[in-house]
Image (cartoon, grey):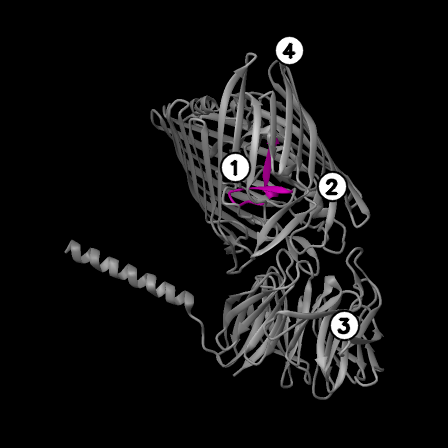
Amino acid sequence: MEFLLLFVSFLPFFEIKDTIYSYACLDHLLSNFRVPYNYSIKSLAFYSTPIYSNLLLFKGYNIYSPSLGGTLPEENLVFFDGIPLINPMLGYQELSLIPANLIGIAEVIHSSSPVSGLTGIGGAINLIPLKNPLEVKASNLRKELKLGIVPFKGLSFTVFHETFTDSFPIEYENITLWVKNTHDKKTGFLAKFSQGTVLVIKRKAGAPGPLGSLSMGERDELSAGSNFNFSLKKCNLQLSSNYTSQTYTSSGTSDIHKTLFLRGVIKGKEVETGANLYGANSTKIGNHIIPEIFGILGIKRMLTQKTELIATINLIYNPTFKTLFSNPSISLSNNLKFDLFGFLTVSLNHRNPTLNELYWPEDNFARGNPELKPERSFNIDAGLRKVSPKSYLNLFVFFKKINNGILWVQEDKYVPKNFASLSHKGAGLEAVFKPRKDIIYAEFNLNLQDSRLNGTPFIYRPNLTLSSSLGMGPTKIELSYIGKRPERPNSTKMLPPVWMINLSMEKSFTLGGQNFAIRAGVENLLNKNYEIVRGYPLPGRELFFEISVNRRM
Amino acid sequence: MLKKTVTLIIVVVLFSLIACRKAEEYVPELKNYLVIVNTLSETVSFYDLDKDTLYEDVITTGRTPNDLLILGTTGIIVNSGFQGIPALDVIDLSQMKLLSRKPLPTGSNPYSIAYMNGNFYVTLAANNMVYVLNQNFLPVDSFTVGKWPEGITAFNGKILVASTGFNIQDYTYGDGYLYVVTKTKAGFSKDSVKVGKNPQVVKIRDNKIWVCCTGDYAGNTGALYIINPSTLAIEDSIKVNFYPSDFEVFSNGTVLCTDFMNGIFRIRNNSLIDTVMIVYGASRIIKDGNTGLVSVFNASDSNYIFFVDPDSNIVYDPINAGLAKGVGPIGIFRE
C-alpha cells in the first residue's frame, strides 16, 4: 500500500480504488504493497510517447496496439477505469479509440494477468482518467475540449471532443510525402457513479493503409463500456460490459462489425466465480457467441514472519473449445528489510483464438481458421522492490514461454495458425526520485529484452528500451528510446532506433477561486517521422498549447 | 601479475572486437553462384554452386522485392514498395554489394523490369504505365499500357508488356492483353493481342513470344500462349487446370510451370501435363542449361531451391535457403 500511496503523492488525482490492483487483488487477496507482480504506474503527459516501462505501443494511422514485454496485442488485457475493453473479434482494444485528453495515468501489471477469469498472457493495462473538469488544447495536429461537472452526490460527468488532422507531411528516405485520410473525430462522455463507470465514445476516422497501399477506408465506430461493483452481504458483485460497433467503408462497400462482451463476477473472501460472454454480429464473420465460466480459489498464508504465499487456481471452462484450464499461480513475497521486498510469481495462462482468427471468411487477403486451439503460456516474474518516502526502485526479471502461439502466416493468403513457439525474457529497472517536494521529479525505466519466434528474433521487438522524464518546477522533459528491432522475420533488416524528446512548461494561477494552468510545449522535438510499425511513419514535431482547470501533472 | 593479467584481458578484448568487425564485413569471393531474392526477409542470399554453400542475407533490399534482372555484373532488383517507397536496387554482383537505391513513384507498385538499347523499362502496375529509365536509372520517358501491367521483356527493338486487367478496387480481372510497344519519333506505337485471364509473365523462347496467364484464382484456370512476334498471331495455346505463376521452356519443347498452391508441373508436346512435385509455395523458375531451378516460398518454415530435370521429371539436390525467408526471384551469376 505504501508504494501506491507514494505514487498518489506524485499524482494528486489518482485514487487507489480505481486501479486494476484493487479490482484484482486488493480487496480480498492482497493487503499490502508486497504485491508479487511486476507492477508500474505511469503518468501520460504527452501523446507521442511510444513506450511506458515495457508497454510498447505499435502505432499505425488511427490504430494503436499494445504490447507488454514483447507479447502480441491479443495477449494483453486493456481496461479503462476498470471497464474491460474487450473486443472479441480483435481480441484486444485498439487504443487510439480512447481520446488522449481523457487519460491521465496508465497502470500496468506486466506479469501474466491476475485479473480473475480473464486471460492476459502479457499482462493488464488500466487507463485511468484525468479528473480535471476543464481542458482545452490546440496543436498543429489536434484540437481537444473536455468539460466536466464536479462530483455531485457520487456522480461526475465529463464530455469530451477531440479531432486529429486529415493529413500531415513526412520526410521519408529523403522524399517529402503527405500522409492523407488520417482524420479522426471522437466525441463522447464518461460518467462515474459511486458504484461504477460508464464510457461512451463515438468516432469517425480515416483508415489509411501503410505507405504504398492504395487502400483509403473510412471507419465509423461506437464504443460503450461499463463496470459496476455492488457490495452484498458477504460478497461483492461485479458486472461489466463492452459493446463496439464499427462500419468500415472502402471502395464503395461497407462492412459492419458489432461485438459484445459481458461479464459477471461474485467475489467472496477466498473464492470467486463468474461468467464471460464473447459475441459478435458481423457482415464478415456472421453471428457467434462464445460463453465461458470460471471459478477461482485463492489462498493467502504467512509462511514465516516475513514470507507470504499466495496461491490461486483459476479454473476456466470454455464449451466452444472444449477446454478446461486451471491456470494456477503461485506467488511468494519476502520482506528482506523494512523497505525492501522480493517477489516471485510462477503461473500458467492461456489465450483463446479471437473470433476473427476463427471465422474470418476467405477474401482477397486472408481467411480464418476454425481449427485453431488456445495458446498456452508459462510465466515467471521475479524482482526486488524498494520503497522510501523519496524514492521507488523496482528491479525485475521475467520469462514467458508461449506454446501453440497463434500468428497470421502468409501463404496464398494470410491464415492464422498455431505454429509459433514464442519466448520473451528480459530484465528491467524502474526508478522514481522525488527528493524535494514539487520541485524535482525524476523517473527512469530501462528494459532489456529478447523476444523470439521459433528461435528467431521476433519482429518489432527491441532489445533495449528506455523511458525517462524529469520535472523541474514548471518544466517537464521526457526522453524515450526504442532500440533497433527486426523489421522482417528472420532477417538482418532492422528498423532504426527511436529517440523521442518531449518538452513542456506550465504556469498555474488562480481565477475566481479555481486553479488554472496554462501549458505549452513541443512533442517529438527532433521532428523525425519514426516508424514503430513499418509503413506507418508517424507525424513530426507537434507544438501545443493547453489551458486547464487543475493542471495535468 | 595483476597488471599483466589486466593487459592481457584488454588485448584479448580488443582483438575480439576487431575480429567481430571483420566478420561482419566479410563477403565471400564467388565465381559461380545463385542469386536468391528473399521477398519476406527482404534480403539477398548467395549460393555458391561450386562449394554448395549458402551465404544468407548478404544484402538487404528495399521494401517488397518482386523481380530480379541480371545484366553482366549488375543485378537489378525491383522493389514494389508496399509499406515504403518503391525503388530499384542496383547490385554489383562481382562484389556482392548494393551500389545504389533508385526511388520510383510512390504508390506505383512497380512489378518487373526489362532492358533494351541502353534503357531500362519498368512496369508500374498501379499507374498503368511503363517507366523508361536511362543507364543512370533516371526517368527519361514513360508510356501508358493497358491496365495493371506486370510482366515485361524486350525483343527485336520492341517492348512486350503483359497487361493483367486487374482491378484493385474489387480484385477482379478484366481481359488480359499482350502489348507490343515500339519507340517512334512521334512517341510510342502500340499493338496488342488479347490473351487469357491475368497474364503475368512474358518471355521470349525459341524466337517466339510466350505469355503465361495465371487465371483468376476463382475457377478460371490458366493457360500459356505462344505468339508469332512478327504477325502477333497466336500460334498455339496450352490450357492447364491449375494457376501457373511462372514457366520455363527447355530444349525439346518441354515446359516446366509453377503453381504457388499446387506445385511444379511439366508440359510435353504442348498438351501432356505431369505433376513434377506437389509442393506449397512453388514460385519462380529459371533455366540453367537443361535444368530447371525452382524457388519454393515459405513464410513460416524452410524455403528451398529445387533442381528439376525436365526430361526425367526428377527433383534433386534441394538447397535449404533458410527459415521463413519467402524466397522469390532467383538468378545465376558466373564470372
Mark 1, residue position: A522
- Mark seen at residue A153: 4
Q: Are discs 3 and 2 less than 8 Å apart at CB?
A: no
Q: Depth-wise, is mark 4 or mark 3 nearer the camera?
A: 3
Q: Which mark is residue B162?
A: 3
**Mark pair 1, 2: CA separation:** 29 Å
Residue toward you, A114 or A251? A251
Magenta segment boundaries in residue numbering: A63-79
Badge 1 element: strand
Between A214 and A155, the residue placed more toward the observer is: A214
The label on residue A133 is: none
Residue A79 image point, x, y percent: 61, 31
The residue identified by callout 2 is: A219
Label 3 chain ID: B
Dot 1 alpha-carbon crowd within 10 angstroms: few under 14, some 14 to 19, many 20 or more: many
Tell me the amino acid under the disc marked 1.
Answer: Val
Question: Mark 3 is on which residue type?
Answer: Ala
Query: Mark 4 and mark 3: span between their CA atoms?
Result: 73 Å
* Magenta stretch encompasses residue A73: yes
Amino acid type of disc 4? Lys
